[in-house]
Structures are given as structure tokens and as C-alpha cells.
Image (spheres, grey):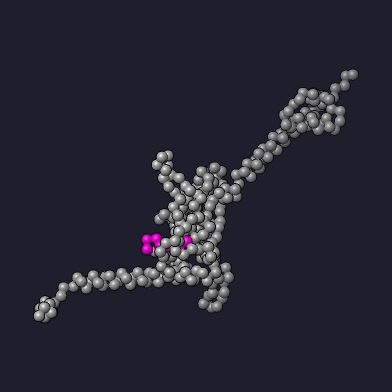
């Protein structure tokens, strides 16, 4: 009659399991409880309480990491379905559009592009996957972008560009792929995210330009973005020649203008003018 159990109302495995669950989840129905007779029982209850807290912390961390992982953030970064080639300030440029669907911004965004195609060396060696870095810029800046609205990324086809001597027919016949990589830090979590896309030669449209999708709403006094026209392009007048040929023609025209102005500026001989007047 003087015997006191270590835990009250423990009669079977089921009641033991319920007591363990109630202790770990701090439910505490009040039916089962430890006594002072067994120090081992008190130690096990304390140990399970600490283990329950650690387990809950791990579960919350796993769920938070899954919900905020960079892969999910990268799915809201948009790339245009096609790239275009047209003139900008008299120079042929390859352009594509990028955008961000979320209100939270990407900090320290950086974009780069690699041209991958087959190359043959002077010795006859054939390199199947040869990569060439393409110089990119946005709105006159470099590859580091202030990414708060949709932007058009530009690659100027200069003498340093691998597209310098390529005409529209070469873009159709040649086989290559442009891999674009956009990296940045997620504002809400501080984690680095990366989004990638690529354009093959059939996805590059010569003589096209992107539609404007940013407009100012006078009634609401703010800018609005129409993402339904994100991939919309329209045709523009573009020379059907390579950038090298276009640059050569522009230089010839400039030289011809310079020579014409020089001829007009040279004074004529008076004796010749008198003879011509007679």
C-alpha cells in the first residue's frame, strides 16, 4: 500500500506511448505524471523535452529552407523566347529581354552570355564545344544591372564580336547556341540564385525589335508593366548584310562626304574662272 509508481496511470505500452507524446508536445492532459520516487524517470522526461525542441527546430528549418530555396526564386525570372538583331544608333546589335515577376528585387544582379559552337584551328584541330564570352550591356551600363524593371540586354556586334562577319544567311546556316546566365542575391533571404536560358540560331530574328511594355498611368501616377507583351516583337528596316560590310559601307559614305566638302572648300583659280567665263 505504500508503493508509489514512477509514473502514474501507466498500465500498458499504449499508455506509455501516450505519456511520451504528451510530454514531447506539451499537451499535458493531467492523467499521467511522473513522481519523485524515480530520478531516472525525471531525467528521461527532461531529455525527451529537450529532444522534442531540437526536433521541432530542425523541422521548421527544413520547411523554411524548402520554401525559400533559390530554385523557386529563379522560376520567377523571365527571359524572352527569342533574341533579335536590329540597328541601334547605327550599329547592329543582338538583343534579348529579361524580367522579374516578383516585387522583391534581385540584389547585385549580373548577367553574362557564352557563345558555344564548333571551331577549327589553323592546324586542323576541330573543337566541338568552343565557348566565347559575349560582351553585354544594359542601358549603357555593363553586365552589372540595376534589376527593378524589365530590361533589354544588348550585345553590340563590333569587330571584337564573333558575329562581326556573319550575314542573315550565316545565322540561318550556322549551328551555334548562346547560353545566358543571370545571377543575383535574393533580397528576402540573402541566398544566391541563378537562372539560365539559351538561344539557338533558329530563335534569333533578324530585323526585329521588342515592343515597349512599360507605360505610365497618368490616373494612378505610376508605371505599369504589361507582361503579356513580354515576348512581342515587330519588324524594322535592317540591312541584310553583316556588321563588317555595314561598317565598311558607312566608312565609304563618310569618306565620300568628307571629299565632297573638301572639294567645295578649295578656292578656284581666277585665271581658270576668267577662261571659263569667256
The structure residue drawn at horizontal position 40% and vertical position 72%, both measured from the top left corner, is: 245
The answer to whether residue 209 is left or right of residue 53 is left
In the image, residue 68 lies at what x, y percent? 60, 44
- The residue at the far top in this view is 1
Q: Quadrant of the C terminus?
A: bottom left
Residue 89 among magenta residues: yes
Residue 145 visible in the picture? no
> What predominant SS class does the magenta segment belong to?
strand
Count of marks, rendered view: 0
The structure residue drawn at horizontal position 58% and vertical position 70%, both measured from the top left corner, is: 128
Q: Does residue 105 lie above or below 91 as drawn?
A: above
Q: Does residue 24 lie above or below 244 as drawn?
A: above
In the image, residue 208 lies at what x, y percent? 45, 61
Span shown in magenta: 84-90
Q: Does residue 232 lie above or below 44 as drawn?
A: below
The structure residue drawn at horizontal position 16% and vertical position 73%, both measured from the top left corner, is: 267
> 119 or 122, which is in the foreground?
119
Residue 118 among magenta residues: no
In the image, residue 142 lies at what x, y percent? 44, 56
Q: Quadrant of the N terminus?
A: top right
- The residue at the far right in this view is 1
Residue 151 visible in the picture? yes
> 206 or 180, which is in the foreground?
206
Q: Where is residue 199, by image quadrant?
A: bottom right
The structure residue drawn at horizontal position 87% and vertical position 21%, both measured from the top left corner, is: 3
In the image, residue 83 lies at what x, y percent? 49, 60
Amino acid at each position: 500500500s505504500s508503493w508509489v509508481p514512477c509514473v502514474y496511470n501507466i498500465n500498458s505500452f499504449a499508455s506509455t506511448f501516450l505519456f511520451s507524446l504528451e510530454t514531447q508536445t506539451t499537451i499535458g492532459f493531467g492523467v499521467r505524471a511522473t513522481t519523485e520516487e524515480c530520478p531516472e524517470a525525471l531525467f528521461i522526461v527532461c531529455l525527451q523535452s529537450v529532444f522534442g525542441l531540437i526536433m521541432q527546430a530542425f523541422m521548421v528549418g527544413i520547411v523554411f529552407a524548402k520554401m525559400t530555396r533559390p530554385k523557386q526564386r529563379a522560376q520567377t525570372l523571365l527571359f524572352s523566347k527569342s533574341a533579335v538583331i536590329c540597328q541601334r544608333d547605327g550599329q547592329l546589335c543582338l538583343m534579348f529581354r529579361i524580367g522579374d515577376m516578383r516585387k522583391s528585387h534581385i540584389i547585385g544582379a549580373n548577367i553574362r552570355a557564352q557563345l558555344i559552337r564548333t571551331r577549327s584551328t589553323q592546324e586542323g584541330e576541330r573543337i566541338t564545344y568552343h565557348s566565347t564570352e559575349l560582351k553585354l550591356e544594359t542601358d549603357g551600363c555593363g553586365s552589372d544591372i540595376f534589376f527593378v524593371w524589365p530590361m533589354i540586354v544588348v550585345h553590340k556586334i563590333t569587330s571584337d564580336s564573333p558575329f562581326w562577319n556573319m550575314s542573315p544567311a550565316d545565322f540561318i546556316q550556322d549551328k551555334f547556341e548562346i547560353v545566358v546566365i543571370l545571377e543575383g542575391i535574393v533580397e528576402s533571404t540573402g541566398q544566391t540564385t541563378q537562372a539560365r536560358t539559351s538561344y539557338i540560331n533558329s530563335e534569333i530574328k533578324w530585323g526585329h525589335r521588342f515592343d515597349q511594355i512599360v507605360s505610365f498611368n497618368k490616373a494612378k501616377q505610376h508605371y505599369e508593366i504589361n507582361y503579356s507583351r513580354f515576348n512581342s516583337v515587330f519588324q524594322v528596316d535592317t540591312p541584310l548584310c553583316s556588321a563588317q560590310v555595314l561598317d565598311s559601307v558607312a566608312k565609304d559614305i563618310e569618306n565620300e562626304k568628307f571629299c565632297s566638302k573638301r572639294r567645295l572648300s578649295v578656292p578656284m583659280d581666277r585665271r581658270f574662272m576668267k577662261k571659263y567665263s569667256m
